[in-house]
């Protein structure tokens, strides 16, 4: 009886071992495929970033391709969405602190070395420090407020669409301030329209009425599209473009 039971159990054990081996191999293959997919995706993101940099980015942006699995998108040479991020972009008298845009409906050429996208939508951020540097460099108060950019000039948000610059020099002997409303003037410019000022000599105040921050050479053909807002982080605005070729 004992030998008969052993003979019955041995095939069952072999079947269980075979089943476990099969599951193990399936798991290993899946892990390898997922690793290959992520590796190919990382390579494609790096290559796309290098190509997109040629569209006006001073340094290589970060590109993130959405969707999984990635390799099935490669086969069709079509991607639903990519995100492009960059920072410290010089733009005339100011520096854009950060840019984040999403592009949809991306098609690659048969060589996989170029492509086109559908519409792009996103935001830019100009930090308060960058605005202070622009005020100092541009000298909007004819060297008065701008002259304090070395440490005496402080820019702060005082509402959802207003900025205030405070100048404190000589240990508080000289104090001046100006408050501007932040507005867009078409697709290529942000304007600071003077709302009020205090302690600013009259010969300088007139030049602070309307300070222009031109954004005529944003990368990738982007233009301002509304959504302007000021906060403790700086000025943020929506940007968009019809398409991008890279």
Image (cartoon, grey):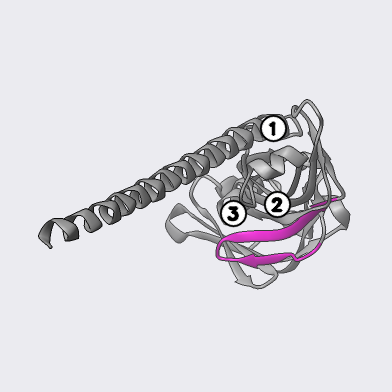
Q: In the rendered image, which residue does mark 3 sit on? A: 127
Q: Is residue 128 above or below residue 107?
A: below
Q: In the rendered image, which residue does mark 2 sit on? A: 101
Residue 144 visible in the displayed image? no
Q: Nearer the viewer, mark 3 or mark 2?
A: 2
Q: CA distance from mark 3 to mark 2?
A: 18 Å
Q: Hey, which residue is sitting farthest left in the picture?
A: 2
Seen from the viewer's position, the closer of residues 176 and 163 is: 163
SS type, badge 3 = loop
Q: Is residue 183 above or below residue 124?
A: below
Q: Looking at the picture, how far across and down is residue 223, in whole percent?
A: 82, 50
Residue 244: assigned label? none
Q: CA distance from mark 1 to mark 2?
A: 14 Å
Q: Is residue 97 above or below residue 234?
A: above
Q: Looking at the picture, how far across and down is residue 7, in whole percent?
A: 21, 54
SS type, badge 1 = helix
């Amino acid at each position: 009886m004992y030998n008969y039971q052993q003979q019955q159990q041995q095939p069952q054990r072999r079947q269980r071992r075979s089943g476990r081996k099969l599951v193990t191999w399936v798991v290993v293959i899946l892990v390898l495929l997922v690793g290959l997919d992520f590796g190919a995706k990382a390579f494609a993101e790096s290559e796309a970033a290098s190509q997109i940099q040629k569209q006006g980015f001073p340094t290589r942006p970060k590109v993130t391709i959405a969707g999984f699995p990635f390799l099935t998108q490669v086969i069709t040479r079509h991607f639903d969405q990519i995100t492009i991020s960059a920072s410290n972009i010089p733009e005339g008298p100011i520096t854009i602190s950060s840019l984040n845009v999403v592009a949809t409906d991306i098609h690659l050429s048969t060589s996989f070395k170029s492509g086109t996208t559908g519409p792009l939508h996103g935001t830019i951020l100009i930090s308060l420090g960058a605005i202070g540097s622009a005020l100092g460099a541009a000298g909007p108060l004819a060297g008065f407020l701008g002259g304090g950019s070395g440490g005496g000039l402080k820019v702060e948000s005082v509402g959802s669409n207003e900025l205030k610059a405070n100048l404190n020099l000589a240990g508080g002997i000289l104090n001046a301030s100006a408050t501007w409303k932040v507005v867009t003037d078409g697709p290529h410019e942000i304007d600071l329209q003077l709302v009020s000022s205090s302690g600013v000599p009259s010969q300088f105040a007139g030049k602070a009425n309307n300070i222009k921050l031109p954004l005529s050479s944003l990368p990738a053909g982007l233009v301002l599209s509304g959504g302007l807002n000021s906060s403790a982080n700086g000025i943020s605005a929506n940007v968009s473009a019809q398409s991008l070729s890279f």
